[in-house]
Amino acid sequence: MRELWKDNNYSYLKLEEAKEVDNFLIEGIEDEESGFDFFKGLGIVGYSSTFKAWLRKFPRPIFLVAVKDKRLVSWMYVEEWEEPANDGFPVYVLRAVETLPGLRGKRIGLRLFLLMLKQTAGYVITKPITPEARRFFEKLGFKDETEMHNPPIDLSHRSSYLVFPVYKRREVLEDFEGYLS
């Protein structure tokens, strides 16, 4: 486990081993009405066991969390895509990002995204599952593959994915620099 950044309220960590999940209180909607609800309706039960399973994968995913005291308040799961982009850059898939419902809108997920950009190089793709998520990613500079001239990644068999272009990385990190200082 590595601390990537800290402010007055939260510590932002990169978890690297499954056993590190046990250090935190993780409240799912099944445990607490105000808990995480991303898995609701997906047939996945138990955040802790799912996080541990993800962290046992190889190659290791990028798993970032925001915590207050020992309570996990936000998380992000990113995997490396099996093939590089057409131009040779690596591709990462942002599979999920979630913040506790009562803390949404406080830029915690944005900070996780910025920290993830600092952990990766190349493209990031994601498939937003809600209109709100789509707007969030589009504001950050993600583009629909159909909007791109000569798309770097073939997503023709995967609908609704958005692509974060390599050239946007520096711009976004500079635009939001104040969020990590």
Image (cartoon, helix red, strand yellow):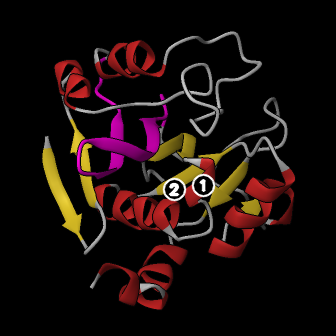
* Real-space Cα separation, disc 2 to disc 1, in angstroms: 31 Å
Amino acid at dot 1: Gly
Residue 57, x across and y down, in percent: 33, 16
Mark 1 surroundings: few (<14), some (14-19) or many (≥20) residues within 10 A: few
Q: Which dot marks residue 102?
A: 1
Q: Residue 169, image x and y in percent?
A: 46, 73
Could you tell me what secondary structure mostly forms the magenta stretch?
A: strand
Percent coordinates x, y for residue 21 in the rendering: 26, 26
Q: Can residue 128 be found in the magenta stretch?
A: no
Please name the residue that numbered disc 2 is placed on: 123
Earlier sequence position, callout 2 versus callout 1: 1
Amino acid type assigned to the residue bearing label 2 in the image: Tyr
Comparing 152 with 138, the one in front is: 138
**Disc 2 vs disc 1: Cβ atoms closer than 8 Å?**
no
**Residue 14: image x %, image y %?**
24, 45
Q: Residue at x 38, y 57 (%)?
A: 116
Using the rendered view, name the quadrant where residue 141 is placed: bottom right
Magenta residues, as a range?
A: 58-83
